[in-house]
């Protein structure tokens, strides 16, 4: 779960320290107060794109820190242990955006890549906002949602692996059979890639060694200056050096001890301090001797690192994995040049992989079709509760063994919706309005929750376009999710806010500074009254707000 959020210098937020609690927490406030900025701040920690215009005008940088407890997510804990991150006292995810355009990420104050931050963050937190509703219109997103509900990850992985092997074998066969020119071009390109990679002389750990060497060489000037400054200060700066001043003090103390023998023990301490200074200077000089001021080596290392990064991008692998890519391509070249690499054997392999692929695609289709029928009924039932009594949701899964092979199988998945009596379900992109799409998104989320869901879900105005009794149902659904998850929701509806375990009010002061406060019971009444009646809070609105709160189970 989320424990705390700290924000400095982000948009209209100058300084914010926010603690979270279990259950359902809602964030309310007037339009433009900055409610969605809180969701955006958490999105930054999850690896979303960062730009300079997010930095507050009077700040040099924006910083967001999120404290989490990952123990409810075993997969996340296993990942953290594998990467040697300690989470015994919680987990700190931090993102810093500087005015100069740089963006830095940290896990437990240890520098990390934004991709690494995204990897762990998305295992713990899932954000549902207006953009997510729009993604629901995309066919690839519809397939992803359905596959997540099927629980057939192993079959999907096997299908993708079979497709990749079939595709590669088919390409090799095409290169060998009847297209000598294409084969020669492919072989020539492979040889070029291998020569280019081999020229770097990469082995396991080479990149890490280069990176460490560059860090050391780049800091040599600074280290040398620091060591020399300390030596001057401690020893070599004539009478102003600390050693000389200690020596003078020792002489004066010896005179004092002759007058007062009780100062003898104090007199013995200063020579010890002088010895410590001498030892420190000795260590600094040794460090100075070790400093390697070698601009040529630095330039060579940086040039080699640049080549590694360029080729890593070219081959779409991480720089530290480029050596493995080189090994794989060397093995592939050796195979392509081997006598056993013949067209007849490849044709047999293509035929075998084709049958394997068709069988796996059929298995995946059956799982999708079964889950689609179940989910269609569940989502339709929730939509009826959300004020769409005549709606019908349907997931259609069609299978075509004649279509072109792909990594996701041979299915065409289409989410269809009918919103009125007697209507035939049509594509949701043509049928659903903005409000209906938000309700559909929530209904799907409610129907698909399971053991693999993240422990925290954040909803940014999922109730857009909803009102009346449907709004109350939205609140109930969110509260039900909060029985097993930590749920955060930005809302403008009092029917939703009243059902939360905790309510935060987001206010903007002077049009330039946003503050967030956790409301007590009286504060909730006032805020719900504002949400019910606007700026002028009437007695009737307050009474209605109190009734809303009393009606909720606590």
Image (cartoon, rainbow, N blue to C red):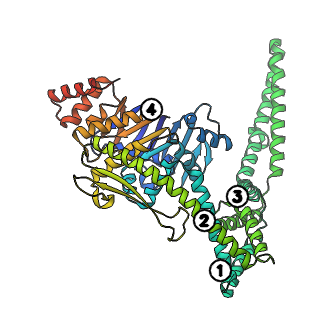
Q: Pick the residue in front: 374 or 65.
A: 374
Q: Is residue 420 left or right of residue 172?
A: left
Label 2 vs 3, first from the N-terminus: 2
Q: Nearer the viewer, mark 4 or mark 1?
A: 1
Q: Which disc is residue 163 wearing?
A: 2
* Dot 3 or dot 4, earlier in sequence: 4
How much space separates mark 2 and mark 3, taking CA atoms?
A: 27 Å
Mark 4 and mark 1: Cα distance apart in space: 59 Å
**Residue 174 tag number:** 1
Q: Nearer the viewer, mark 2 or mark 3?
A: 2
| Residue 20 image label | 4
Comes first in the chain, label 4 or label 2: 4
Judge left or right: residue 481 versus residue 206: left
The kind of secondary structure element at disc 4 is loop
Marked residue nearer the N-terminal end (4 or 1): 4
Image coordinates for residue 438, horizontal then vertical, percent: 32, 49
Label 3 Cα crowd, 10 Å radius (few <14 / some 14-19 / many 20+): some
Q: Nearer the viewer, mark 1 or mark 3?
A: 1
CB of mark 2 within 8 Å of CB of mark 3? no
Q: Nearer the viewer, mark 4 or mark 2?
A: 2
Secondary element at tag 1: helix
**Is residue 12 in view?**
no
Contact, CB < 8 Å: mark 1 with mark 3?
no
The C terminus sits in image quarter: top left
Left or right: 153, with 304 as reference point: left
Name the one closer to the observer, 33 or 156: 156
Q: Around disc 2, counting alpha carbons within 10 Å, would you say few (fewer than 14), some (14 to 19), or many (20 or more)? A: many
């Amino acid at each position: 779960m989320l424990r705390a959020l700290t924000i400095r210098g982000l948009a209209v937020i100058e300084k914010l320290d926010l603690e979270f609690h279990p259950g359902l927490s809602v964030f309310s406030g007037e339009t433009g107060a900055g409610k969605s900025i809180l969701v955006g701040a958490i999105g930054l920690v999850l690896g979303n794109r960062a730009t300079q215009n997010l930095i507050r005008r009077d700040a040099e940088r924006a910083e967001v820190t999120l404290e989490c407890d990952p123990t409810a997510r075993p997969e996340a804990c296993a990942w953290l242990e594998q990467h040697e991150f300690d989470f015994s006292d919680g987990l700190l995810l931090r993102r810093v955006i500087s005015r100069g355009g740089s963006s830095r990420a940290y896990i437990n104050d240890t520098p990390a890549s934004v991709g690494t931050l995204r990897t762990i963050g998305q295992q713990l937190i899932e954000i549902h906002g207006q953009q997510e509703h729009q993604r629901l219109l995309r066919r690839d997103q519809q397939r992803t949602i359905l596959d997540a509900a099927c629980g057939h990850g192993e079959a999907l992985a096997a299908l993708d692996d079979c497709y990749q092997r079939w595709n590669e074998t088919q390409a090799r066969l095409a290169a060998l059979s009847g297209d000598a020119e294409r084969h020669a071009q492919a072989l020539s390109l492979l040889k070029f890639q291998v020569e280019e990679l081999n020229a770097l002389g990469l082995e396991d750990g080479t990149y890490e060694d280069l990176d460490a060497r560059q860090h050391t060489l780049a800091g040599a000037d600074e280290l040398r200056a620091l060591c020399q400054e300390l030596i001057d200060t401690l020893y070599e700066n004539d009478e102003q050096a600390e050693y000389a001043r200690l020596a003078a003090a020792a002489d004066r103390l010896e005179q004092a001890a002759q007058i007062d023998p009780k100062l003898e023990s104090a007199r013995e301490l200063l020579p010890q301090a002088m010895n410590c200074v001498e030892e420190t200077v000795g260590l600094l000089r040794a460090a100075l001797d070790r400093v390697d001021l070698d601009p040529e080596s630095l330039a060579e290392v940086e040039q080699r690192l640049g080549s590694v990064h360029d080729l890593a991008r070219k081959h779409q692998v991480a720089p530290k994995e480029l050596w493995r890519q080189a090994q794989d391509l060397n093995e592939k070249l050796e195979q392509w040049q081997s006598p056993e690499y013949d067209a007849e054997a490849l044709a047999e392999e293509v035929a075998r992989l084709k049958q394997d692929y068709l069988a796996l695609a059929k298995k995946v289709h059956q799982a999708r079709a079964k889950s689609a029928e179940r989910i269609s009924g569940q989502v339709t039932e929730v939509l009826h509760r959300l004020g769409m009594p005549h709606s019908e949701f349907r997931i259609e899964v069609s299978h075509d063994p004649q279509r072109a092979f792909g990594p996701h199988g041979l299915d065409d998945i289409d989410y269809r919706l009918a919103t009125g009596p007697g209507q035939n379900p049509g594509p949701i992109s043509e049928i659903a309005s903005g409000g209906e799409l938000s309700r559909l998104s929530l209904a799907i989320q409610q129907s698909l929750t399971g053991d693999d869901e993240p422990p925290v879900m954040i909803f940014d105005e999922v109730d857009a376009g909803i009102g009346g009794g449907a709004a109350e149902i939205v609140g109930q659904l969110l509260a039900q999710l909060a029985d097993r998850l930590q749920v955060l929701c930005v809302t403008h509806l009092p029917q939703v806010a009243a059902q939360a375990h905790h309510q935060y009010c987001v206010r903007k002061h002077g049009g330039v500074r946003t503050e967030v406060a956790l409301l007590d019971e009286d504060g909730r009444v006032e805020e719900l009254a504002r949400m019910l009646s606007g700026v002028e809070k009437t007695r009737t609105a307050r009474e209605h707000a109190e009734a809303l709160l009393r009606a909720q189970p606590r």
